[in-house]
Image (cartoon, helix red, strand yellow):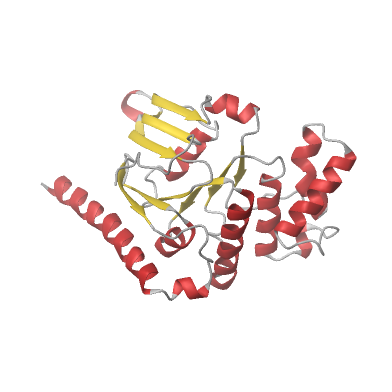
């Protein structure tokens, strides 16, 4: 399978020959080169690779937080800037980034408030999202009264507030303990399936990538390029739970992704040594 093989449907993200260089002249750093990728609506795609390979840079290009220096990029057929202006995507970072003086409800409602939604609209949407992420009993609480995992659920709800068709996530569970992380992986899979939102998810964890994803996109060390794509074969109808984690087919896919990642890395190191 190539990086451009995707399920049938309109593309949520299309990158063609995408590149990003930071700086110029002797100090220029080539972060990404010749990236080709498509993400279908409702598809869950994880970006996996070593630190510094450009995973987060690719995500930031899609989010219009950085601008490419080469190639083409579109989000639902629009420029990344227009998709941002149209609120076609939500973004969740490793740190929840909640406003400490606002309640859970007020944090979730913030994007709606900034874009002029009425009080009634905000109240209805907050109730819907609080239920979706399992925090309906904590809407009046403040961030310092929540665990790290609960704060991340608030951040996910906030990112989904305006019903984006695409959710961009940059290691949102990276700072959590393993038990909380596994629980939130299951919650995120459920939320993505119920909302129909496409997800592009950056992670360093191979099991996490396989557990969550329809496809795992493997990237090389800098300059980042896509060196392999592994389809997990785990359908949206399959429950993401502990039963799946013990399934031999899950472990086989983890092994396949690991071999793709380390095999490519070893080949790259061998070429550099020569």
Is residue 102 visible in the rendered image? The answer is: no
How many discs appear? 0
Q: Determine whether 182 is above or below 64 in the image.
A: below
| Residue lying at 67% horizontally and 58% vertically, measured from the top left | 153
Horizontal placement of 166 versus 234: left or right? Answer: right
Horizontal placement of 200 versus 96: left or right? Answer: left
Is residue 250 visible in the rendered image? The answer is: yes
Question: In the displayed image of the protein, which residue is found farthest to the right?
Answer: 119
Question: In the displayed image of the protein, which residue is found farthest to the left?
Answer: 274
Q: Determine whether 127 is above or below 78 in the image.
A: below
| Residue lying at 78% horizontally and 34% vertically, measured from the top left | 114
Q: Nearer the viewer, residue 38 or 110?
A: 38
Q: Which image quadrant for residue 117? A: top right
Q: Nearer the viewer, residue 124 or 209?
A: 124
- Could you tell me residue 167's position as x and y percent? 58, 44
Horizontal placement of 198 versus 26: left or right? Answer: right
| Residue lying at 54% horizontally and 30% vertically, measured from the top left | 64
- Could you tell me residue 58's position as x and y percent? 44, 38
Q: Nearer the viewer, residue 95 or 250?
A: 250
- Could you tell me residue 8's position as x and y percent? 43, 40
- Could you tell me residue 52's position as x and y percent? 39, 46
Q: Determine whether 74 is above or below 166 in the image.
A: above
């Amino acid at each position: 399978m190539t990086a451009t093989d995707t399920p049938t449907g309109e593309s949520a993200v299309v990158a063609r020959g995408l590149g990003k260089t930071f700086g110029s002249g002797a100090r220029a750093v080539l972060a990404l080169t010749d990236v080709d990728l498509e993400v279908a609506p409702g598809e869950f795609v994880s970006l996996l690779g070593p630190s510094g390979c450009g995973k987060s840079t690719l995500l930031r290009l899609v989010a219009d937080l950085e601008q490419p220096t080469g190639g083409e990029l579109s989000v639902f057929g629009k420029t990344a800037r227009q998709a941002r202006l149209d609120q076609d995507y939500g973004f969740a970072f490793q740190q929840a980034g909640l406003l400490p003086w606002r309640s859970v409800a007020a944090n979730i409602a913030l994007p709606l408030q900034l874009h002029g939604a009425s009080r009634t609209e905000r109240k209805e949407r907050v109730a819907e999202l609080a239920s979706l992420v399992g925090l309906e009993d904590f809407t009046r609480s403040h961030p310092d009264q929540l665990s790290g995992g609960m704060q991340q659920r608030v951040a996910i709800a906030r990112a989904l507030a305006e019903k984006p068709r695409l959710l961009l996530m940059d290691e949102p569970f990276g700072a959590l303990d393993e038990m909380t992380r596994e629980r939130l992986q299951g919650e995120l899979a459920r939320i993505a399936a119920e909302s129909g939102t496409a997800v592009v998810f950056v992670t360093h964890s191979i099991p996490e990538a396989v557990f969550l994803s329809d496809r795992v996109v493997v990237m090389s060390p800098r300059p980042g390029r896509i060196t392999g794509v592994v389809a997990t074969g785990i359908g949206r109808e399959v429950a993401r739970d502990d039963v799946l984690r013990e399934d031999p087919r899950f472990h086989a896919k983890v092994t396949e992704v690991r071999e793709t990642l380390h095999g490519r890395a070893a080949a790259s190191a061998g070429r550099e040594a020569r």
